[in-house]
Image (cartoon, rainbow, N blue to C red):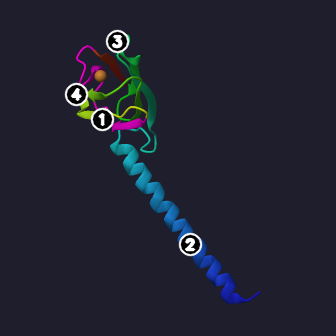
Amino acid sequence: MDVSVLTRARRGLGVVVILLVFHAVAWMAAHRIQGGKSPHLRQEVALIASLEGDGFLPGLLTVTRGVPVRIFATSADGAHAVIIPEFRAAVRLHPGSVDVLDFTPIRTGSFQIVCEYHPRMRATLQVTE
Ligand SMILES: [Cu+2]
């Protein structure tokens, strides 16, 4: 076999190993920054806004502190807006579409989810450790 092919293969393998080590170190640093939770995790939940009932279905969302949350929200009956004041998160809902609300809950506890347009619409965000 040609020696230069082996040399190039070894060099390529070396580059791959170096990249893997860099990736592992970066992942461990991010993991430590986020309190031991994987930076690649994301919690995804669905929420329907409606004038019926208490205004949101489900009425209780339970998520874990420190892990990014993505809420897929839709309206069953017109204009609504999902607001979580505690985490300064808000999104307006457009009838007929699914809108996305991203935030990271940084505190544990029980927090309100409200609608900008209909004060009686309420749900609860429970953030656990
Ligand atoms: Cu509303």
Numbered circle sitting on residue 91: 1
Q: What residue is pinned by disc 4?
A: 85
| Drawn side of residue 113 relative to residue 53, left or right | left
Q: Amino acid at mark 2?
A: Gly
Amino acid under label 3? Asp
Mark closer to the chain start, 4 or 3? 3
Q: Amino acid at mark 4?
A: Pro
Q: Nearer the viewer, mark 2 or mark 1?
A: 1
Mark 3 or mark 2: which is in front?
3
Q: Is residue 42 magenta?
A: no
Question: Which x, y percent locates residue 54?
Answer: 34, 12
**SS at circle 2:** helix
Nearest to viewer (mark 4 / mark 1) = 1
Which residue has dot 3 on it? 54
Q: Which residues are magenta?
A: 97-120
The answer to whether mark 3 and mark 2 are in CB contact below 8 A is: no
Which residue is found at the position 33% from the left and 18% from the top? Answer: 124
